[in-house]
Image (cartoon, helix red, strand yellow):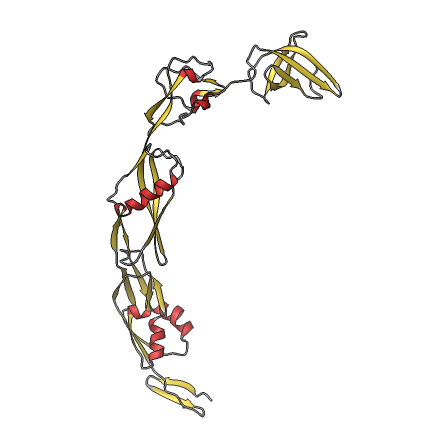
């Protein structure tokens, strides 16, 4: 049978019941300032604990007081709030004698790490992620001496954030450093130099002219700061024409070409009209250029009537069932 304890005044107890037990007072003396190198601060770090019950003392020492501030920064702990919201709910039957500072400054220790410390890790990451051919690209760190603060303890770091498998010029990735509950992203600026064989115009190509392999050559060029997407293979020229005139020595890129239309403006076309099982074909003149599947205006050469038709293939357009009369 447990004894019932009633506290009358400090230092005096009235015990009732069939059995008696010894009650131990707990004294907490809070420090003014503490320095931590962990992500979590325990009660034993911020206060001296006086208690004759060793088991209870050990439990109190391991009570989490707060999460520490980021490395190199500080935070404050209000002793009254800590007692009310942390200790009382866990140790409601314990009488605490509180003294010392009522506002503890918790400083987080730090060491500095530099981006260059992880140069090999970053280079390995690029080697894995970049799809440019081997020997055609080179990555250079910008601001390799830039540093950040972290805890003076073990740290886990990995690299992420490359947006393209074919980076060119200035790109940003990030180092992700983790220590316990703390996680920090460190931006890392890099420059990727790319020298690749690309298609270059070997003669003047007139606007609207179909481009073929004989009009270009493959030539190694520095495309690091080249804005548009260059072409790298002769097969890319199949069925394309120049959007504007292209001077010799110009890098051929996607903005300079477009697919050749199956039907050009002024082409003679066959207009097909299907009504049930009946198919009628008449001759027409395309009044617009277009590709397969696109709608264009076509003039019936007999009636001179304009109709909208869908390009079926080169030289053939169709008017769907229920369409306008030709």
- Give the percent coordinates (x, y) of residue 51: 31, 79
- Give the percent coordinates (x, y) of residue 58: 34, 75
Can you say whether 320 is above or below 305 in the image?
below
Can you say whether 236 is above or below 82 in the image?
above
83, 36: nearer the viewer: 36
Q: Residue at x 58, y 21 (%)?
A: 292
Q: Residue at x 41, y 85 (%)?
A: 6
Can you say whether 31 is above or below 214 in the image?
below
- Give the percent coordinates (x, y) of residue 62: 35, 70
* Side (left or right) of 202 relative to 278: left
The quadrant in which residue 295 appears is top right
307, 46: nearer the viewer: 307
- Residue 133 seen in render: yes
The quadrant in which residue 141 appears is top left
* Side (left or right) of 141 relative to 284: left
- Give the percent coordinates (x, y) of residue 77: 32, 64
Single out the residue that lies furthest toward the bottom: 18
The quadrant in which residue 18 appears is bottom left
- Residue 326 seen in render: no
89, 118: nearer the viewer: 118
Q: Residue at x 33, y 43 (%)?
A: 124
Can you say whether 245 is above or below 58 in the image?
above
Question: Where is the C terminus found, in terms of image quarters?
Answer: top right
Single out the residue that lies furthest toward the top: 302
Q: Residue at x 68, y 8 (%)?
A: 303
């Amino acid at each position: 049978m447990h004894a019932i304890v009633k506290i009358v005044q400090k230092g005096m107890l009235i015990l009732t019941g069939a059995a008696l037990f010894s009650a131990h007072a707990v004294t907490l003396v809070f420090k003014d300032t503490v320095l931590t190198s962990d992500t979590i601060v325990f009660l034993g770090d911020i206060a001296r604990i006086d208690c004759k019950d060793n088991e209870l003392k050990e439990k109190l020492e391991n009570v989490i007081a707060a999460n520490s501030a980021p490395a190199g920064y500080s935070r404050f702990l209000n002793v009254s709030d800590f007692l009310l919201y942390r200790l009382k709910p866990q140790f409601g039957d314990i009488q605490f004698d509180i003294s010392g500072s009522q506002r503890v400054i918790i400083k987080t220790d730090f060491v500095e790490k530099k981006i260059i410390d992880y140069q090999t890790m970053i280079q390995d990451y690029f080697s894995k992620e970049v799809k440019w051919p081997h020997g055609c690209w080179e990555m250079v760190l910008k601001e390799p001496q830039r540093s950040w603060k972290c805890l003076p303890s073990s740290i886990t770091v990995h690299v992420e954030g490359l947006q393209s498998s074919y980076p060119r010029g200035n790109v940003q990735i990030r180092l992700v450093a983790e220590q316990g509950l703390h996680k920090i992203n460190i931006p890392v600026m890099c420059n990727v130099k790319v020298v690749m064989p690309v298609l270059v115009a070997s003669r003047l190509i007139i606007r609207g002219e179909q481009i073929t392999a004989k009009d270009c050559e493959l030539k190694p060029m520095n495309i690091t700061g080249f804005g548009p997407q260059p072409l790298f293979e002769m097969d890319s020229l199949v069925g394309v024409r120049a959007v504007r005139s292209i001077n010799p020595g110009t890098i051929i890129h996607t903005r300079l070409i477009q697919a050749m239309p199956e039907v050009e403006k002024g082409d003679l076309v066959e207009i097909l009209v299907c009504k049930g099982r009946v198919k009628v074909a008449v001759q027409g003149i395309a009044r617009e250029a277009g590709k397969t599947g696109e709608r264009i205006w076509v003039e019936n050469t007999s009636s001179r009537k304009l109709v909208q038709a869908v390009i079926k293939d080169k030289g053939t357009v169709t008017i769907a069932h229920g369409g306008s009369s030709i």
